[in-house]
Amino acid sequence: MSDTPKVTGIGGIFFFSENTAEIKDWYSKNLGLSTNEWGSTFEFRNANRPDEINYL
């Protein structure tokens, strides 16, 4: 059994902001996320098919 941690789910918090540019900048600087006008995407591998790449 591997000791490597694995993500088993993803959730989200949605909120309103008057200054979306400032929020996107904060996410970029503090979380390293690239954002566009709709949010951010996450690449992940399927646990049952590790060669398969999916996106959220």
Image (cartoon, helix red, strand yellow):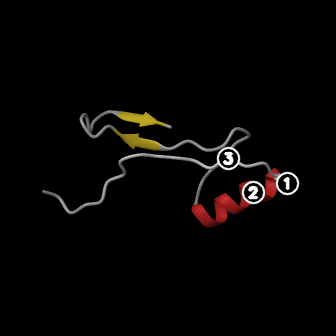
Q: Residue at x 69, y 42 (%)?
A: 36
User: Which numbered tag is attached to residue 23?
Assistant: 2
User: Which numbered tag is attached to residue 14?
Assistant: 3
Disc 1 versus disc 3: distance between alpha carbons? 14 Å
Q: Position of residue 49 (x, y in %)?
A: 25, 34
In the picture, residue 39 is in which quadrant?
A: top right
Under circle 3, the secondary element is loop
Compared to 35, does 52 lie above or below?
Answer: above
Callout 1 environment at 10 Å: few (<14), some (14 to 19), or many (20+)? few
Q: Residue at x 41, y 46 (%)?
A: 9
In the picture, residue 19 is in which quadrant?
A: bottom right
Tag 2: amino acid: Ile
Pointer 2 or 3: first along the chain? 3
Circles 1 and 2 in contact, beta carbons < 8 Å: yes
Mark 1 lies on residue: 19
* Furthest-left residue in this view: 1
